[in-house]
Image (cartoon, rainbow, N blue to C red):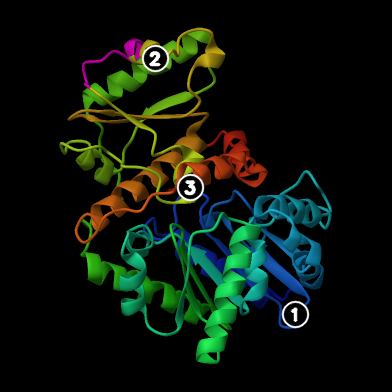
Amino acid sequence: MPAEAEIRDLVAVSRFAGSDLLLAQGAGGNTSVKTAAGSRLLIKASGFRLADVTGEAGYLDMDLPALRQIMEEPELADLAPLAAHDETVRRVRGLLPDEGGPRPSMETGFHLLLDRVVLHTHPIYLNAFTCSREGQAACQEEAGADTAWVPYAAPGYPLARAVAESCAAHLAEHGHQPTRIVLGNHGLITTSADVDTAIRDTRALAGRGEQFFGSLPGDACELGEPTSVTTRWARDLQAIFDRVGHAAVARPARRRALLAAVRRDQPLTGGPLVPDDAIYGVHLCRQLAASTPPADWLHEHGKAQPAEELPAKAVVALEGEGVVLVAPNEASLDFMEENLLANVLIHELIARRDQPRYLQTREVDELLAMESEQYRQKLAQRRGEPCRS
């Protein structure tokens, strides 16, 4: 059994990242702590917010040697990457006492490779590097020798393999494992023997990004007041959903950076930058004149009655007014809005120095087909209560 100190470490490192939208959005990011004896892995549960990790919930206590045996099976290397991922998920679920209960993070694979404490975040300032065309060279110049760069790979087993290869190359070149691993079009991993170092390194690399690209407005992540036009548009759209029995919620976006961005004469987002953009559909934004009635928008896209043809997720930017979000419930809306916020802010930073590098259509299709990602969304959709911001 893990000691209380190890659980406290997991809670501390999770709360650090989960308390700052500039570091983690929605259910993004994950954390783990290995026990001193090397027999157990405490790891954040898939689909949970980092802020939801407590001493009693939000994580799983896993058999570390058994997990390593699964991930190191030679036959996995002979499978296509996504097929190998599905197989590892199936085997890991076999270790759980309740197969229908919480699962460990889909990124469990790379946690097994690294030091005692692992902190994986999606820092907005750092992702301005990872999502820009010249970002790798700029990041490596800013970050220093203890930082490795991993080109984009699909989450799960493919990313774990890519991290393993990068760590091996770093060891061969520098004589030690990297303590900071930057993931192309994804985020950051920091790893160390203690929580304080992992936190310090995360802050340091996010700070490098802020120095390079410049600071964002101090109130970018704060809640603001939607305009009356946006509020009325969302209310009218909700009335259509209710009338035909469509199980979705329409709500105005409330983050100040989104309210400001939609008033600029440019698209709200340019495309999917990171996996969660695809999962939450935040890049599929429709720009509309604010005078366009919701019913006209639905008919324009062939989304009229019956209810099953109406959108389950949507982002509508009303020119000069605000943004309306559509998702299955309030929890999903919170996840969508936070990831849309990150996408918009990363675009804003990149525009100061470079051009964005987007995920390709094939990569987006792969993400949407992954059972693990569908599971994460279902978790949010089953939670009727609003998630904490």
Contact (Cβ within 8 Å) of mark 2 with mark 1: no
Q: Which residues are magenta?
A: 289-296
Packing grade of label 2 (10 A; few <14, some 14-19, many >=20) is: some
Question: Is 132 positioned to the left or the right of 178 in the image?
Answer: left
Query: Residue 4: x percent and y percent?
Result: 68, 74
The residues tagged by marks 3 and 2 sit, at their Cα atoms, a distance apart of 25 Å
Residue position marked by numbered label 1 in the rendering:
38
Quadrant assignment, res 76: bottom right
Query: Residue 151: x percent and y percent?
Result: 48, 64
Question: Is 183 positioned to the left or the right of 91 in the image?
Answer: left
In the rendered image, residue 293 lying in the magenta stretch gets the answer yes
Q: Nearer the viewer, residue 72 or 294?
A: 72
Packing grade of label 3 (10 A; few <14, some 14-19, many >=20) is: many
Q: State the quadrant of the N terminus.
A: bottom right
Q: Is residue 354 above or below residue 272?
A: below
The residues tagged by marks 2 and 1 sit, at their Cα atoms, a distance apart of 55 Å
Residue 171 visible somewhere in the drawing: yes
Secondary structure under the numbered disc 2 in the rendered image: helix
Residue position marked by numbered label 2 in the rendering:
298
| Residue drawn at the location 65% of the way across and 42% of the way down | 375
Whichever of callouts 2 and 1 sits on the residue coming sooner in the sequence is 1
Residue position marked by numbered label 3 in the rendering:
276
Chief secondary structure of the magenta span? loop
In the rendered image, residue 93 lying in the magenta stretch gets the answer no
Contact (Cβ within 8 Å) of mark 3 with mark 2: no
Amino acid carrying label 1: it is Gly
Q: Nearer the viewer, residue 173 or 312?
A: 173
Residue 219 visible somewhere in the drawing: no
Amino acid carrying label 2: it is Leu
Q: Is residue 127 above or below residue 253?
A: below
